[in-house]
Image (cartoon, rainbow, N blue to C red):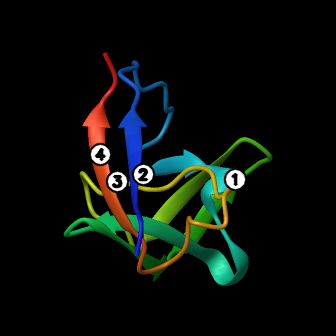
Amino acid sequence: HTTTRWYRRRQRQMCIRDSVIPTGAIGPGNNVLVVEDGQLVERTITLGVRNWRTTEVKAGLDEGDTVVVSRDSPDIQPGARVVIEEES
């Protein structure tokens, strides 16, 4: 397995509701990928209000979970190992 390095951007959170994620982070079957113990795990979430940009998450995520917001690489899949480093 290859370890993918991700960089978490330091930015101000601009959500109008609690538990809001980018709509693009949601895959088929209302699944998202989260980082658990250095690897990606798929979770099913319960959706609330949504639009093309953001989606409210009613259940399935915990405060502080790191959610993958883009699946634009074939390496981004359940079971992939990851290292998250703060972007400077």
Q: Work out how far the residue at label 3 is from the one at label 2, CA to CA, in angstroms.
A: 12 Å
Quadrant location of the N terminus in the rendered image: bottom left
Image position of 10 (left or right of 51): left
Circle 2 — which element? loop
Q: Nearer the viewer, mark 4 or mark 1?
A: 4
Q: Distance between the residues labelled 4 and 3?
A: 10 Å
Task: Tell me whether circle 3 and circle 2 mark residues in contact (CB < 8 Å).
Answer: no
Which residue carries the number 3 mark?
66
| Dot placed on the residue nearer the N-terminal end, 3 or 2 | 2
Q: Are marks 4 and 3 in contact (CB under 8 Å)?
A: yes
Label 2 crowding class (10 Å Cα cut-off): few <14, some 14-19, many 20+? some
How far is the residue under mark 4 from the one under mark 1? 20 Å
Residue that appears at 60% across and 63% down? 48
* CA gap, disc 4 and disc 2: 21 Å
Amino acid type of disc 3? Answer: Thr
Q: Mark 4 points at which residue?
A: 84
Residue at (28% x, 64% y) in the render: 62
Secondary structure under the numbered disc 1 in the rendered image: helix
Query: Looking at the picture, how far across and down is residue 74, in whole percent?
Result: 66, 67
> In the rendered structure, are the residues bearing label 4 and label 2 in contact, judged by CB atoms less than 8 Å apart?
no
Residue found at the far front of this picture: 2
Amino acid identity at mark 4 = Ile
